[in-house]
Amino acid sequence: MRLPALLLSAGVLAVIGCAGPDGPATYVGGSACVSCHEPETAAWTGSDHDLAMDQATDSTVLAPFGGEAAEHAGLRTTFFRDGARFMVRTDGPDGSPQDFEVRYVFGVRPLQQYLVPLPNGRLQALPFAWDTRPGEHAWFHLYPDDSVTTRDPLHWTGAFQNWNHMCADCHSTNLVKGYDADAKAFSTTWSDIDVSCEACHGPGSGHVAWARKRSRFPLLVPEPDTLTEKAMGLVVSIHDRAIWAWEMDSTTGIARRTRPRGATQDLPTCARCHSRRASLRPEYAFGRPFEDTHVVEPPVPPLYHADGQVLEEDYVYASFLQSRMYRAGVTCGNCHDPHGLRARADGNLLCRTCHDAARFDTTSHHGHRPGTPGSLCVDCHMPETTYMGVDARRDHSFSTPRPALSQVTGVPNACTGCHAERTDE
Protein backbone atom coordinates (compact mmCIF):
# COMPACT_ATOMS: atom_id res chain seq x y z
CA MET A 1 0.00 0.00 0.00
CA ARG A 2 1.02 3.63 -0.41
CA LEU A 3 1.51 5.57 2.80
CA PRO A 4 -0.32 8.80 3.72
CA ALA A 5 0.55 12.13 2.15
CA LEU A 6 2.18 12.95 5.49
CA LEU A 7 5.35 11.48 4.05
CA LEU A 8 4.89 12.30 0.40
CA SER A 9 5.84 15.96 0.75
CA ALA A 10 8.62 15.36 3.25
CA GLY A 11 12.07 16.30 2.20
CA VAL A 12 10.86 18.98 -0.22
CA LEU A 13 12.84 22.18 0.19
CA ALA A 14 12.97 25.08 -2.22
CA VAL A 15 16.22 27.00 -2.02
CA ILE A 16 15.71 30.47 -3.42
CA GLY A 17 19.11 32.10 -3.34
CA CYS A 18 20.25 32.26 -6.94
CA ALA A 19 21.53 35.10 -9.07
CA GLY A 20 19.00 37.08 -11.08
CA PRO A 21 19.22 39.69 -13.80
CA ASP A 22 20.27 42.29 -11.25
CA GLY A 23 23.10 40.20 -9.82
CA PRO A 24 23.35 37.88 -6.80
CA ALA A 25 20.27 37.49 -4.66
CA THR A 26 20.13 39.55 -1.48
CA TYR A 27 18.36 39.08 1.85
CA VAL A 28 14.95 40.69 2.13
CA GLY A 29 13.91 39.58 5.63
CA GLY A 30 11.36 37.01 6.70
CA SER A 31 8.57 39.58 6.77
CA ALA A 32 8.64 39.65 2.95
CA CYS A 33 7.54 36.00 2.87
CA VAL A 34 4.45 36.22 5.07
CA SER A 35 1.83 37.40 2.58
CA CYS A 36 2.36 34.44 0.22
CA HIS A 37 3.34 31.81 2.78
CA GLU A 38 0.90 32.25 5.65
CA PRO A 39 0.57 28.55 6.65
CA GLU A 40 4.35 28.13 6.82
CA THR A 41 4.68 31.36 8.82
CA ALA A 42 1.98 30.24 11.25
CA ALA A 43 3.77 26.92 11.81
CA TRP A 44 7.13 28.66 12.27
CA THR A 45 5.82 31.27 14.73
CA GLY A 46 6.66 30.13 18.24
CA SER A 47 9.00 27.37 17.05
CA ASP A 48 12.52 26.88 18.36
CA HIS A 49 13.80 28.58 15.20
CA ASP A 50 11.56 31.59 15.76
CA LEU A 51 12.68 31.79 19.40
CA ALA A 52 16.35 31.03 18.79
CA MET A 53 17.35 34.55 19.84
CA ASP A 54 15.59 37.79 20.72
CA GLN A 55 16.06 41.08 22.49
CA ALA A 56 15.57 40.94 26.25
CA THR A 57 12.08 42.27 26.99
CA ASP A 58 9.28 41.53 29.43
CA SER A 59 7.71 39.22 26.85
CA THR A 60 10.87 37.27 25.91
CA VAL A 61 12.72 36.87 29.24
CA LEU A 62 11.39 33.76 31.00
CA ALA A 63 13.44 34.02 34.22
CA PRO A 64 12.03 36.26 36.98
CA PHE A 65 15.09 38.50 37.60
CA GLY A 66 13.53 39.33 40.95
CA GLY A 67 16.61 39.39 43.16
CA GLU A 68 17.32 35.64 43.10
CA ALA A 69 20.83 34.56 44.01
CA ALA A 70 22.81 31.52 42.88
CA GLU A 71 26.21 30.32 44.07
CA HIS A 72 28.93 28.40 42.32
CA ALA A 73 32.51 27.69 43.37
CA GLY A 74 32.20 30.14 46.26
CA LEU A 75 31.00 33.00 44.06
CA ARG A 76 27.55 34.57 44.35
CA THR A 77 25.53 35.74 41.35
CA THR A 78 22.38 37.85 41.68
CA PHE A 79 19.68 38.46 39.07
CA PHE A 80 17.61 41.65 39.38
CA ARG A 81 15.81 44.46 37.54
CA ASP A 82 16.89 48.08 37.15
CA GLY A 83 13.75 49.68 35.80
CA ALA A 84 13.18 48.13 32.37
CA ARG A 85 16.65 46.57 32.29
CA PHE A 86 17.50 42.97 33.22
CA MET A 87 20.67 42.89 35.29
CA VAL A 88 23.10 40.38 36.73
CA ARG A 89 25.76 40.94 39.38
CA THR A 90 28.56 38.42 39.00
CA ASP A 91 32.32 38.09 38.61
CA GLY A 92 33.59 40.11 35.66
CA PRO A 93 36.63 39.64 33.40
CA ASP A 94 38.99 40.52 36.27
CA GLY A 95 37.19 38.30 38.77
CA SER A 96 35.64 41.14 40.77
CA PRO A 97 31.84 41.45 41.22
CA GLN A 98 30.27 43.82 38.70
CA ASP A 99 26.81 44.69 37.37
CA PHE A 100 26.05 43.71 33.77
CA GLU A 101 22.98 44.27 31.61
CA VAL A 102 21.36 41.35 29.79
CA ARG A 103 20.62 42.48 26.23
CA TYR A 104 19.46 39.28 24.54
CA VAL A 105 17.77 35.97 25.32
CA PHE A 106 19.11 32.83 23.72
CA GLY A 107 16.88 29.82 23.15
CA VAL A 108 13.65 28.96 24.89
CA ARG A 109 13.33 25.27 25.86
CA PRO A 110 14.27 23.36 27.89
CA LEU A 111 16.53 26.19 29.01
CA GLN A 112 17.06 29.84 28.25
CA GLN A 113 20.46 31.55 28.25
CA TYR A 114 21.23 35.24 28.53
CA LEU A 115 23.74 37.33 26.59
CA VAL A 116 25.72 40.25 27.99
CA PRO A 117 27.64 42.81 25.90
CA LEU A 118 31.32 43.32 26.66
CA PRO A 119 33.85 45.65 24.98
CA ASN A 120 34.92 45.20 21.35
CA GLY A 121 31.49 44.15 20.15
CA ARG A 122 31.47 40.88 22.03
CA LEU A 123 28.34 39.20 23.34
CA GLN A 124 28.99 36.64 26.06
CA ALA A 125 26.74 33.88 27.42
CA LEU A 126 26.28 33.87 31.19
CA PRO A 127 27.22 30.64 33.03
CA PHE A 128 23.80 30.43 34.69
CA ALA A 129 20.74 29.49 32.64
CA TRP A 130 17.04 29.35 33.47
CA ASP A 131 15.38 25.92 33.47
CA THR A 132 12.16 26.44 31.47
CA ARG A 133 10.73 22.94 31.88
CA PRO A 134 7.27 22.87 33.46
CA GLY A 135 7.57 22.50 37.22
CA GLU A 136 11.37 22.80 37.14
CA HIS A 137 11.88 26.56 36.98
CA ALA A 138 15.23 27.45 38.56
CA TRP A 139 18.62 29.00 37.88
CA PHE A 140 21.37 26.42 37.34
CA HIS A 141 25.06 26.51 36.43
CA LEU A 142 26.07 24.98 33.12
CA TYR A 143 29.33 23.58 34.59
CA PRO A 144 28.23 22.50 38.08
CA ASP A 145 31.19 20.20 38.68
CA ASP A 146 33.89 22.60 37.53
CA SER A 147 35.45 25.53 39.36
CA VAL A 148 35.60 27.92 36.41
CA THR A 149 37.71 31.01 37.08
CA THR A 150 38.62 33.95 34.86
CA ARG A 151 41.76 32.09 33.76
CA ASP A 152 39.67 29.22 32.38
CA PRO A 153 38.56 29.51 28.71
CA LEU A 154 35.16 28.23 29.87
CA HIS A 155 34.65 31.33 32.02
CA TRP A 156 31.65 33.26 30.77
CA THR A 157 33.84 36.18 29.67
CA GLY A 158 36.21 33.91 27.70
CA ALA A 159 36.46 32.76 24.11
CA PHE A 160 34.44 29.56 24.54
CA GLN A 161 31.39 31.50 25.71
CA ASN A 162 31.62 34.13 23.00
CA TRP A 163 28.35 34.36 21.07
CA ASN A 164 29.85 36.01 17.96
CA HIS A 165 32.19 33.12 17.22
CA MET A 166 30.65 30.08 18.90
CA CYS A 167 26.87 30.43 18.60
CA ALA A 168 25.63 33.27 16.41
CA ASP A 169 25.80 31.63 12.98
CA CYS A 170 23.10 29.10 13.86
CA HIS A 171 20.77 31.32 15.86
CA SER A 172 20.32 34.26 13.46
CA THR A 173 19.81 34.80 9.74
CA ASN A 174 22.37 36.33 7.36
CA LEU A 175 24.89 36.46 10.18
CA VAL A 176 28.12 38.32 9.37
CA LYS A 177 30.64 38.00 12.21
CA GLY A 178 32.59 41.10 11.17
CA TYR A 179 35.74 40.17 13.05
CA ASP A 180 38.70 42.55 12.87
CA ALA A 181 41.80 40.51 13.68
CA ASP A 182 44.00 43.56 14.19
CA ALA A 183 41.61 45.20 16.63
CA LYS A 184 40.46 41.87 18.06
CA ALA A 185 36.93 43.22 17.84
CA PHE A 186 33.59 42.20 16.35
CA SER A 187 31.08 44.20 14.36
CA THR A 188 28.48 41.46 13.97
CA THR A 189 25.29 42.00 11.96
CA TRP A 190 22.20 40.02 10.90
CA SER A 191 19.09 40.57 8.80
CA ASP A 192 16.78 38.60 11.12
CA ILE A 193 17.67 38.11 14.77
CA ASP A 194 16.28 34.57 14.75
CA VAL A 195 16.35 31.59 12.37
CA SER A 196 13.99 32.96 9.75
CA CYS A 197 12.97 31.84 6.24
CA GLU A 198 16.17 32.83 4.47
CA ALA A 199 18.38 30.97 6.95
CA CYS A 200 17.25 27.75 5.25
CA HIS A 201 15.97 28.90 1.85
CA GLY A 202 18.70 31.42 1.04
CA PRO A 203 18.49 35.12 0.16
CA GLY A 204 15.09 35.77 -1.34
CA SER A 205 15.21 38.92 -3.46
CA GLY A 206 15.02 36.99 -6.74
CA HIS A 207 12.10 34.89 -5.59
CA VAL A 208 10.20 37.93 -4.28
CA ALA A 209 10.73 39.74 -7.57
CA TRP A 210 9.48 36.68 -9.47
CA ALA A 211 6.37 36.41 -7.27
CA ARG A 212 5.51 40.09 -7.65
CA LYS A 213 5.71 39.93 -11.44
CA ARG A 214 3.24 37.05 -11.41
CA SER A 215 0.96 38.35 -8.65
CA ARG A 216 -1.93 38.62 -11.10
CA PHE A 217 -1.93 34.86 -11.59
CA PRO A 218 -2.37 31.94 -9.13
CA LEU A 219 1.02 30.92 -7.69
CA LEU A 220 0.82 27.21 -8.40
CA VAL A 221 3.59 24.64 -8.23
CA PRO A 222 4.08 23.69 -11.89
CA GLU A 223 4.88 20.36 -13.40
CA PRO A 224 8.65 19.75 -13.66
CA ASP A 225 8.80 20.51 -17.37
CA THR A 226 6.58 23.60 -17.45
CA LEU A 227 8.70 26.17 -15.63
CA THR A 228 12.40 26.30 -14.94
CA GLU A 229 13.71 26.68 -11.43
CA LYS A 230 15.70 29.72 -12.51
CA ALA A 231 12.54 31.50 -13.57
CA MET A 232 11.14 31.01 -10.07
CA GLY A 233 14.32 32.25 -8.42
CA LEU A 234 15.24 28.73 -7.32
CA VAL A 235 18.46 26.78 -7.49
CA VAL A 236 17.08 23.29 -6.81
CA SER A 237 14.00 21.40 -7.88
CA ILE A 238 10.82 21.57 -5.82
CA HIS A 239 9.07 18.76 -7.68
CA ASP A 240 10.35 15.74 -5.75
CA ARG A 241 6.97 15.04 -4.15
CA ALA A 242 5.33 14.44 -7.54
CA ILE A 243 7.54 11.54 -8.55
CA TRP A 244 8.00 9.27 -5.52
CA ALA A 245 6.21 7.86 -2.50
CA TRP A 246 6.72 5.35 0.32
CA GLU A 247 5.25 1.88 -0.22
CA MET A 248 4.99 -0.80 2.45
CA ASP A 249 6.97 -3.96 1.76
CA SER A 250 4.80 -6.81 3.00
CA THR A 251 7.82 -9.11 3.29
CA THR A 252 9.85 -6.92 5.65
CA GLY A 253 7.08 -4.81 7.16
CA ILE A 254 9.15 -1.72 6.39
CA ALA A 255 8.27 0.93 3.82
CA ARG A 256 10.58 1.68 0.94
CA ARG A 257 10.82 4.54 -1.51
CA THR A 258 9.41 4.02 -4.96
CA ARG A 259 12.43 5.91 -6.29
CA PRO A 260 15.90 6.37 -4.77
CA ARG A 261 16.62 9.58 -2.93
CA GLY A 262 18.14 12.16 -5.22
CA ALA A 263 20.00 15.36 -4.43
CA THR A 264 17.58 16.42 -1.68
CA GLN A 265 18.25 19.79 -0.08
CA ASP A 266 16.87 19.34 3.42
CA LEU A 267 19.76 17.15 4.59
CA PRO A 268 22.57 19.62 3.78
CA THR A 269 20.41 22.56 4.81
CA CYS A 270 19.75 21.07 8.24
CA ALA A 271 23.35 19.85 8.53
CA ARG A 272 24.65 23.38 8.37
CA CYS A 273 23.65 23.81 12.02
CA HIS A 274 22.69 20.33 13.19
CA SER A 275 26.17 18.85 12.90
CA ARG A 276 29.50 18.93 14.65
CA ARG A 277 31.54 20.59 11.92
CA ALA A 278 34.21 23.10 10.94
CA SER A 279 33.70 25.84 8.34
CA LEU A 280 36.00 26.02 5.34
CA ARG A 281 34.84 29.50 4.31
CA PRO A 282 32.71 32.23 5.91
CA GLU A 283 30.00 32.27 3.22
CA TYR A 284 27.51 29.44 2.98
CA ALA A 285 26.70 28.34 -0.58
CA PHE A 286 22.95 27.72 -0.73
CA GLY A 287 22.04 24.92 -3.09
CA ARG A 288 25.57 23.52 -3.15
CA PRO A 289 26.77 20.32 -1.45
CA PHE A 290 27.29 20.84 2.26
CA GLU A 291 30.86 19.52 1.99
CA ASP A 292 31.77 22.45 -0.28
CA THR A 293 31.84 24.72 2.74
CA HIS A 294 32.07 22.47 5.80
CA VAL A 295 33.93 19.47 7.17
CA VAL A 296 31.85 17.20 9.41
CA GLU A 297 33.54 15.58 12.39
CA PRO A 298 33.49 11.80 11.85
CA PRO A 299 31.61 9.64 14.39
CA VAL A 300 34.69 8.39 16.23
CA PRO A 301 36.16 8.93 19.72
CA PRO A 302 36.53 11.20 21.59
CA LEU A 303 33.40 12.94 20.29
CA TYR A 304 31.50 9.64 19.89
CA HIS A 305 31.60 6.28 21.58
CA ALA A 306 33.59 3.54 19.85
CA ASP A 307 30.48 2.18 18.10
CA GLY A 308 29.35 5.60 16.84
CA GLN A 309 26.82 6.42 19.56
CA VAL A 310 26.82 10.06 20.60
CA LEU A 311 29.03 11.12 23.49
CA GLU A 312 29.69 14.85 23.23
CA GLU A 313 27.27 17.40 21.75
CA ASP A 314 27.28 16.05 18.21
CA TYR A 315 24.10 17.62 16.81
CA VAL A 316 22.48 14.68 14.98
CA TYR A 317 23.80 14.83 11.39
CA ALA A 318 26.80 12.48 11.51
CA SER A 319 24.78 10.10 13.67
CA PHE A 320 22.01 10.02 11.08
CA LEU A 321 24.45 9.33 8.23
CA GLN A 322 25.37 6.05 9.97
CA SER A 323 21.79 4.83 10.11
CA ARG A 324 19.84 2.33 8.05
CA MET A 325 17.16 5.02 7.86
CA TYR A 326 19.50 7.27 5.90
CA ARG A 327 20.52 4.44 3.59
CA ALA A 328 16.84 3.70 2.95
CA GLY A 329 16.30 7.24 1.70
CA VAL A 330 14.80 8.90 4.77
CA THR A 331 15.42 12.63 5.17
CA CYS A 332 14.90 15.04 8.07
CA GLY A 333 11.55 16.20 6.70
CA ASN A 334 10.08 12.70 6.79
CA CYS A 335 9.94 12.86 10.59
CA HIS A 336 10.07 16.60 11.36
CA ASP A 337 7.84 19.37 10.08
CA PRO A 338 10.38 21.77 8.53
CA HIS A 339 8.60 24.92 9.71
CA GLY A 340 7.09 24.03 13.09
CA LEU A 341 9.98 21.60 13.75
CA ARG A 342 7.89 19.23 15.85
CA ALA A 343 7.68 15.54 15.02
CA ARG A 344 5.00 14.83 12.43
CA ALA A 345 3.22 12.42 14.80
CA ASP A 346 3.41 11.49 18.47
CA GLY A 347 5.00 8.43 19.97
CA ASN A 348 5.01 5.21 17.99
CA LEU A 349 2.52 6.65 15.51
CA LEU A 350 5.42 8.38 13.80
CA CYS A 351 7.42 5.18 13.43
CA ARG A 352 4.35 3.23 12.33
CA THR A 353 4.04 5.31 9.18
CA CYS A 354 6.99 3.29 7.81
CA HIS A 355 7.15 0.26 10.13
CA ASP A 356 4.24 -2.19 10.23
CA ALA A 357 2.57 -1.91 13.64
CA ALA A 358 1.50 -5.56 13.69
CA ARG A 359 5.12 -6.62 13.41
CA PHE A 360 7.04 -3.97 15.35
CA ASP A 361 4.70 -2.20 17.80
CA THR A 362 4.15 -5.34 19.84
CA THR A 363 5.40 -6.80 23.10
CA SER A 364 6.91 -9.70 21.18
CA HIS A 365 9.19 -7.21 19.42
CA HIS A 366 10.10 -4.68 22.09
CA GLY A 367 9.61 -6.84 25.18
CA HIS A 368 7.62 -4.31 27.20
CA ARG A 369 3.97 -3.86 28.07
CA PRO A 370 2.30 -1.18 25.91
CA GLY A 371 2.33 2.23 27.56
CA THR A 372 5.28 1.46 29.84
CA PRO A 373 8.88 2.70 29.54
CA GLY A 374 10.62 0.71 26.85
CA SER A 375 7.50 0.27 24.72
CA LEU A 376 8.28 3.38 22.66
CA CYS A 377 10.48 2.76 19.63
CA VAL A 378 12.70 5.71 20.59
CA ASP A 379 13.39 4.24 24.05
CA CYS A 380 15.50 1.49 22.50
CA HIS A 381 16.55 2.89 19.12
CA MET A 382 17.07 6.57 20.01
CA PRO A 383 18.31 6.70 23.63
CA GLU A 384 18.68 10.13 25.20
CA THR A 385 21.83 11.87 26.41
CA THR A 386 21.45 15.00 28.52
CA TYR A 387 23.57 18.05 27.69
CA MET A 388 23.72 21.50 29.27
CA GLY A 389 22.29 20.10 32.48
CA VAL A 390 18.68 19.65 31.36
CA ASP A 391 18.64 19.22 27.57
CA ALA A 392 17.89 15.56 26.70
CA ARG A 393 18.65 14.82 23.04
CA ARG A 394 18.07 11.59 21.16
CA ASP A 395 20.71 9.68 19.23
CA HIS A 396 19.81 9.69 15.52
CA SER A 397 21.87 6.68 14.50
CA PHE A 398 18.77 4.50 15.14
CA SER A 399 20.98 1.70 16.41
CA THR A 400 19.92 -1.57 18.04
CA PRO A 401 20.78 -2.09 21.73
CA ARG A 402 23.59 -4.63 22.00
CA PRO A 403 24.61 -5.46 25.58
CA ALA A 404 27.03 -8.09 24.27
CA LEU A 405 28.92 -5.35 22.42
CA SER A 406 29.00 -3.30 25.61
CA GLN A 407 30.70 -6.19 27.38
CA VAL A 408 33.54 -6.05 24.87
CA THR A 409 33.89 -2.32 24.17
CA GLY A 410 32.36 -0.63 27.21
CA VAL A 411 29.94 1.42 25.10
CA PRO A 412 26.52 2.15 26.61
CA ASN A 413 23.31 0.47 25.48
CA ALA A 414 19.65 1.33 25.96
CA CYS A 415 18.91 -1.85 27.94
CA THR A 416 21.17 -1.20 30.92
CA GLY A 417 20.60 2.52 30.38
CA CYS A 418 17.08 1.91 31.73
CA HIS A 419 17.63 -1.27 33.77
CA ALA A 420 20.44 0.06 35.93
CA GLU A 421 20.05 -2.85 38.34
CA ARG A 422 20.93 -5.34 35.58
CA THR A 423 24.35 -6.07 34.10
CA ASP A 424 25.14 -6.36 30.41
CA GLU A 425 25.61 -10.08 30.93
Image: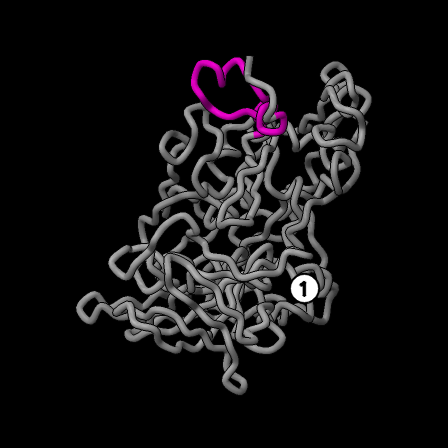
Element marked by disc 1? helix
Q: Position of residue 352 (x, y in %)?
A: 76, 31
Instruction: Give the amino acid at mark 1.
Output: Thr
Residue name at image x 51 percent, y 26 percent: 412
- Its colouring scheme is one colour
Q: Of all residues shown, which one is farthest toward the bottom? A: 83
Give the left or right position of residue 296, taking residue 68 as reference. Answer: left
Q: Of all residues shown, which one is farthest toward the front? A: 74
Q: Is residue 358 above or below residue 7?
A: above
Residue name at image x 63 percent, y 43 percent: 333
Quarter of the image with the C terminus is top right
Question: Residue 416 colored magenta?
Answer: yes
- Tell me the magenta residue range: 398-419
Residue name at image x 68 percent, y 28 percent: 258
Q: Is residue 265 above or below residue 181?
A: above
Q: Position of residue 244 (x, y in %)?
A: 69, 34
The number of numbered badges drawn on the structure is: 1
Q: Position of residue 310 (x, y in %)?
A: 48, 34
| Disc 1 target residue | 41
Task: Let me know if residue 399 appears in the view.
Answer: yes
Answer with the quarter of the image where residue 295 lies.
top left
Q: Nearer the viewer, residue 361 or 62?
A: 62
Q: Residues within 10 Å of mark 1 (few under 14, many from 20)?
A: many
